[in-house]
Amino acid sequence: MGNRAIIKAKGNNRKAVYLHWNGGRDSVEAFLKYCEMRGFRGFETDYGMARFCQIVGNFFGADGLSIGITNNVKSVGDNGVYIVEGWKIVGREGFNGIEQQNYDMTEMLLAIDEAQPKNQQLGDYIIADEVLTETIKTGDIVYMQDLDGTFKKYKVIGVGKDKFVNGTNVVGLPFVDKYGNGDCSNNINNYIRTKTVKKYTNKKELNHRKNQQNWHNKKYR
C-alpha cells in the first residue's frame, strides 16, 4: 500500500530516489520546484539528490522512512518513473499515463516550506509577485538570495550607470543595499541580473493570499 514512485536523473541508470508516499506528479513537481527555489544544484548531482531527500524527509517528518536511495531505476508500480533534468520532469516511464493532479502547486509549496527548519524556510517569498526586472524602480523591495540559501528582502537604492563592475556592464540594472561599505553600486552582487525577480507585496496582501490557500493540517498523499 502506498503512492510510490522512482525519481532518477536523466541518463543515470545506477541510482534513483524511491518514494513510498507522495509519488503523484503534483507532489513530485512541488518537491522539485521547492529545491529549485532554494537554489540547490541540479538533481543529477549527488548534492542535489541529497538535498531533495532532505526536503522530502523533512516534509514526511516522523514518517521519514518513506524515502530512500535505490539502485532500482525501473517502475515499482503506482506512479512509475520520473526522469529529471535540473529540477524539471523531462520524461516518464512505466506508468499508466494518468497523472495525479489533486494539489495546487502553491498550496504544496507552502506546506513543504512549513515542514523545513525555521531558519531555512522561504516564507513569503513563495507567494510574492514575480515581475520583470526592467519594471523595478528605486524604492521597491525585492527578494534576493543570501549565502545560506534563504531569500531576504532588500531595498532597491538605484539603477546602474553605463559602467563595468566585475566585467559586467550594469547600465539599467537595479541594485540593492545588500553589500558594500559606502557605494553599493561598486559590488556586482548587489545588482539584479536575472530577467525576473520576486517583488515584496505588502503584508496585508500576503496574509490574504495565504488565507486563500487552504493548506493547513492537510494530509498530502
Image (cartoon, helix red, strand yellow):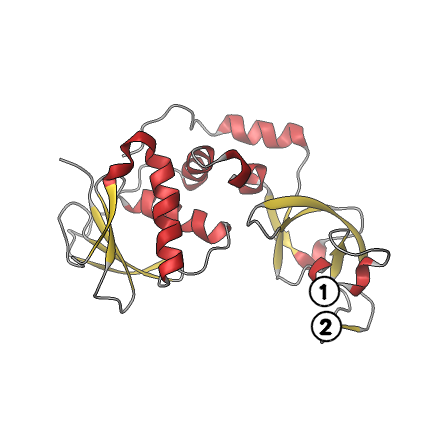
Q: Nearer the viewer, residue 69 or 37?
A: 69
Dividing the picture into quadrants, the one containing residue 167 is: bottom right
SS state under label 1: helix
Q: Which residue bears the numbered disc 2?
A: 166
Q: Residue 133 in the image: x percent, y percent? A: 67, 57
Amino acid type shown at disc 1 = Ile
Relative to 10, is 186 on the left or the right? right
Q: Nearer the viewer, residue 134 or 190?
A: 190
Q: Amino acid at mark 2?
A: Asn
Percent x, y of residue 7: 26, 54
**What residue is pinned by disc 1?**
188
Circle 2: element type: loop
- Gap between marks 1 and 2 measured at Cα: 6 Å
Q: How many marks?
A: 2
Q: Which image quadrant: the N terminus?
A: top left
Vertical position of residue 12 compared to residue 201: above or below: below
Q: Is residue 21 left or right of residue 183?
A: left
